[in-house]
Image (cartoon, helix red, strand yellow):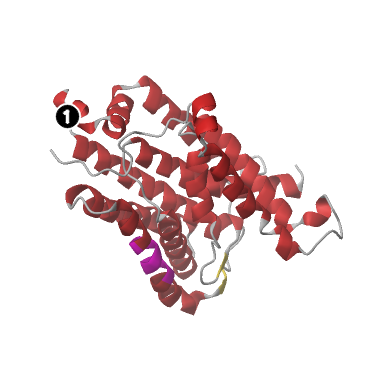
Amino acid sequence: MSELLVRSLEASTVFLLAALGELVNQRSGVLNVGVEGLMLFGGTAAFVVAKSSASYALGLGAGVAVGALLGGVHGVFSIRLRGDQVISGMGLWVLSFGLTTYLGSPHTGPLGLPPFPTFAGLSPFVHAGVLLVVAVWFVLSRTSLGLAIRSAGENPAAAAASGVNVPAVRYLCVVFGGTLAGLAGAAYTLSYNPVWNYNFLMGWGFVSLALVFFSMWNPWILLGGSVLFGAMWQLSLNPEYVLPGVLSRYVWRTVPFLVTVVTLTVISTPWFRTRWGLAKPQALGVPYSD
């Protein structure tokens, strides 16, 4: 398997894990624009613990646990306190930018461990990402829990009247979303690019957030979009594979973000929504009050 293909799939997986957790968040009606913050925290925790303990397992556990905890914190502000979900998410991102810089600075540099184990030439994160897409699709579309999640995001009052505990469902989803964001950060710092530096993600979390809207809240479209953006990102780092000598690599690095802006602009138009049925949850971002 070519190095470019492997690296593209590894990058795609980081996008996919974070976006898949946010997709579940949003299907329950909770918006978290601080996905990048949770990824920064999770990735930093995973890197620091793995480097200090020389254990990938402990590092991975730390990244996932921190992501779940911060997902729950966002849930407290958004669900229990009924605060503005955008402000809560941005607050987490700003906090993460400063705090991870402070906590991670003593560990700046390479991880210093043997390469992360692989299976069939790919890290386990890639295989786990595909399995998670299948699991999320199945739960959302084929189970009573999925119906409860979708109901909480579409019409929470009607869901509550039918016996759904809307706050509990939303808490479950924000913790799950935080867990996957922490896992995505860990996949980045332990496998994809095991070198820590401040703000190491450089906007990956925001691209993951955009991918949820790009996917129209469909896990399968999200998988395809993640592969597309992962390939674009890797090609922006190695443009010589396609167009050697054409423009600076720093110009190429703007391509994934430009495509994100164009994509979001197109899918937000009335024409696109009417033709393709953008399935935005009706109660997305709206606090529920019983």
Residue shown at 52% from the left, 37% from the top: 269
Residue 124 visible to an observer of this rendering: no
Task: Examine the structure image and report whether residue 135 is included in the region drawn in magenta.
Answer: no
Q: Nearer the viewer, residue 152 or 220?
A: 152
Q: Nearer the viewer, residue 250 or 7?
A: 250
**Residue 115 drawn above or below residue 3:** below
Residue shown at 33% from the left, 22% from the top: 143
Q: Which residues are magenta?
A: 91-97
Examine the image and state in which quarter residue 115 appears.
bottom right
Q: Main secondary structure of the magenta part?
A: helix
Where residue 156 sits in the image (x, y, percent)?
A: 23, 32
Where residue 230 sits in the image (x, y, percent)?
A: 63, 47
**Residue 87 drawn above or below residue 152:** below
Specify the amino acid type for callout 1.
Answer: Ala
Instruction: In the displayed orientation, state which residue is furthest to the front.
Output: 270
Q: Quadrant of the C terminus?
A: top left
Instruction: In the displayed orientation, state which residue is furthest to the right.
Output: 245
Residue shown at 64% from the left, 41% from the top: 228
Going by the image, does 287 lie left or right of 250?
Answer: left
Where residue 157 sits in the image (x, y, percent)?
A: 19, 31
Q: How many marks?
A: 1
**Residue 199 drawn above or below residue 231:** below
Q: Secondary structure beneath disc 1? A: helix
Where residue 148 sits in the image (x, y, percent)?
A: 27, 28
Q: Which residue is mark 1?
A: 160
Instruction: In the displayed orientation, state which residue is furthest to the top.
Output: 142
